[in-house]
Image: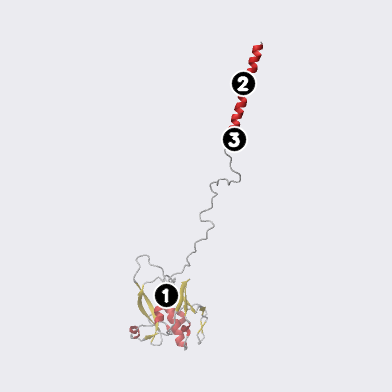
């Protein structure tokens, strides 16, 4: 009987020793696990990174400036091959009475109304002056084209102050008619609005010609072109 008790106690002691050893082993394993240093920033999660370029100044956009002949709204670029030249009619004063349209060929441009105005302001050529009936221009020398745009059927033409210089009702009316007839030849232009040095013209020149709105060919019926 004594041997049985002794044997039981011995087994209990052995079990206790094994349990303690196992507990120590587990504790030792936990102590070796590395810990995250205090204050370290956690790793970024997907989607946390800032968008590419965020916070950087945007590249400046272009100023949108174009060459004067790129377009003025008077025509649309051809769908096929671009022609080398384009024909325009320039309106001069014929024999001191009616206007006369004379065809002239100029290098092709999408801003065909602008090209026509530049040719008109340059005046008739020597050959054109020698034609019959004799032609001339009522537009003063030195008049410059400052701007031209076409929108909603109206050509807004800005001319330098020289355009209003001089006198005489016929001469003033004739120069207005020359511009109106020249610009309304284009299908996108029904009327012309005049500006001088950037200012809208409502009363033209010292002759007091009232321009109460965009001018149409019918407003200059007395100077109806002989080729109309």
Q: Image height check: is 14 above or below 159?
A: above
Check contact, mark 1 vs mark 3: CB within 8 A.
Answer: no
Check contact, mark 2 vs mark 1: CB within 8 A.
Answer: no
| Disc number placed over residue 15 in the picture, else none | none
Where disc 1 sits, the SS reads helix
- Report how far apart the C-alphas of labels 2 and 1 lie in the structure: 112 Å
The residue where tag 3 is placed is: 31
Identify the image quadrant of the N terminus: top right
In the image: residue 53, left or right of residue 9: left
Check contact, mark 2 vs mark 3: CB within 8 A.
Answer: no
- Classify 10 Å Cα crowding around label 1: few (below 14), some (14-19), many (20 and above): many
The quarter holding residue 85 reads: bottom left
Q: Position of residue 108 (x, y in %)?
A: 36, 72
x 60%, y 26%: residue: 21
Q: Nearer the viewer, residue 89 or 56?
A: 56
Where disc 3 sits, the SS reads helix
Q: Nearer the viewer, residue 84 or 33?
A: 33
Q: Position of residue 180 (x, y in %)?
A: 44, 79
Where disc 2 sits, the SS reads helix
| Disc number placed over residue 14 in the picture, else none | 2
- Report how far apart the C-alphas of labels 2 and 3 lie in the structure: 26 Å
- Report how far apart the C-alphas of labels 1 and 3 lie in the structure: 88 Å
Q: Nearer the viewer, residue 175 or 6?
A: 6
Q: Image height check: is 94 above or below 65?
A: below
The residue where tag 1 is placed is: 114
């Amino acid at each position: 009987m004594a041997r049985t008790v002794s044997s039981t106690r011995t087994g209990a002691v052995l079990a206790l020793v094994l349990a303690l050893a196992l507990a120590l082993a587990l504790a030792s394993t936990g102590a070796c696990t590395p810990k995250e240093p205090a204050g370290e920033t956690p790793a970024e999660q997907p989607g946390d990174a800032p968008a590419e370029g965020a916070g950087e100044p945007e590249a400046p956009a272009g100023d949108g400036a174009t060459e004067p002949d790129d377009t003025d709204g008077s025509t649309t670029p051809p769908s096929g091959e671009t022609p080398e030249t384009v024909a325009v009619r320039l309106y001069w004063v014929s024999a001191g009475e009616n206007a006369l349209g004379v065809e002239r060929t100029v290098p092709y441009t999408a801003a065909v109304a602008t090209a026509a105005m530049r040719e008109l302001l340059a005046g008739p050529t020597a050959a054109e002056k020698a034609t019959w009936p004799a032609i001339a221009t009522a537009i003063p020398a030195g008049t410059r084209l400052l701007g031209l745009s076409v929108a909603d059927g109206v050509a807004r033409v800005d001319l330098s102050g020289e355009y209003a210089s001089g006198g005489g009702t016929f001469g003033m009316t004739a120069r207005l008619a020359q511009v109106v007839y020249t610009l309304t030849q284009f299908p996108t232009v029904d009327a012309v609005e005049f500006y001088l040095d950037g200012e809208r013209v409502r009363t033209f020149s010292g002759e007091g010609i009232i321009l109460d709105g965009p001018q149409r060919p019918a407003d200059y019926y007395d100077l109806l072109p002989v080729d109309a």
